[in-house]
Amino acid sequence: MKSMIDACHRFFDLPEEEKKEFQTKNLLDPIRCGTSANVAIEKVRLWRDFLKVIAHPEFNSLYKPAGYSEVSLEFSKRTREVATEILKGISESLGLEADYIAKAMNWDRGLQILAANYYPACPQPDKAIGIPPHTDHGLVTLLIQNEMGGLEVKHKDQWVLVNAAPGAFIVNIGDQMQILTNDKYKSIWHRAVVNNKATRISIAVPHGPSLDTPALPIPELLEREGQAPKYIGMTYEKFMELQASPAAYVKPCLDHLRI
Ligand SMILES: O=C(O)CCC(=O)C(=O)O
Ligand SMILES: [Fe+2]
């Protein structure tokens, strides 16, 4: 984990000139870096640089800084193993076969993104935000950070700072899981605040279905609980596009799919 954070830190430390070639605009470009989440539509003052690299189903990497490629390959593999175990646990907790969700979501072709966030110390932390409130789009996100905290989750209408143990993964449920489980597992609202003391780096690793898979409430669960489905289906790719569009500012993405 530490080597991965160090490698990302070295990337963000590269001169702006050297990062330019990775500043692309398209959501699903294999490698993408930039400032803020969506410069065109953000209204609040954001204090963040990001680097997003798609690591699965195809592994992509950067040729600089030195070492990034090797470290990120190892990190993405191991993180995916943990995510696979979490999916099994969630399937079993729902009374389903351990590989139910993986099979239904075409996990073998599932999307995994290494999303590094860089928040330099901010002179006026109360006037800026690292990442505004959102839920993650995928099934589960595994997140690590350097020694600086800043992730807050919404709990009973209050923002609560997550005090993660050093070296621990923080696991957040994403929107696709909420759809699959017809609201039994809820995606978590979270945001990142900034501080005026030191640079914070976090690496969020969202894991999702394959891009062409639409998540739908699991029929066996609906039948057992006697529930009607609460969501219509949408491919993961379309869902991600929706999340990146101005429509997501009008109402939360899940509400666009709610029946
Ligand atoms: O920096 C953090 O702790 C949050 C990052 C995050 O929510 C994201 O990248 O989706
Ligand atoms: Fe997030």
Image (spheres, rainbow, N blue to C red):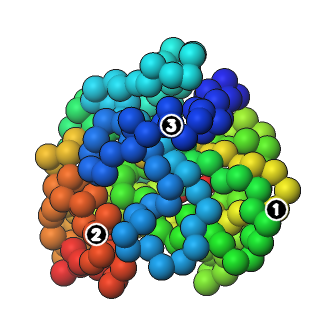
Ligand 1 - quadrant of the structure image: bottom right
- N-terminal of the pair, mark 3 or mark 1, is 3
Check residue 196 in the rendering and tell me which mark sits there, or answer none.
1
Give the residue number, with chain letter if any, for mark 3.
17
Query: What secondary structure is marked by label 3?
Result: helix
Q: Indicate the position of residue 79 as horizontal and vertical percent values.
A: 50, 31
Crowding around mark 1 (Cα neighbors within 10 Å: few <14, some 14 to 19, many 20+) is few
Q: Is residue 27 left or right of residue 238?
A: right
Please name the amino acid that badge 3 sits on. Glu
Looking at the rendered image, the disc whose residue lies closer to the viewer, 3 or 2, is: 3
Q: Indicate the position of residue 10 as horizontal and vertical percent values.
A: 64, 30
Pointer 3 with pointer 2, Cβ within 8 A = no
State the residue at coordinates (75%, 62%).
Answer: 122
Count of numbered badges drawn on the protein: 3
Check residue 245 in the rendering and tell me which mark sits there, or answer none.
2
The answer to whether the residue bearing label 3 lies less than 8 angstroms from the nearest atom of ligand 1 is: no
Q: Is residue 52 left or right of residue 190?
A: left
| Cα gap from disc 3 to disc 2, whole angstroms | 28 Å
| Cα gap from disc 1 to disc 2, whole angstroms | 31 Å
Crowding around mark 2 (Cα neighbors within 10 Å: few <14, some 14 to 19, many 20+) is some
Query: What secondary structure is marked by label 1?
Result: loop
Res 6 → quadrant = top right
Residue 171 seen by the camera: no
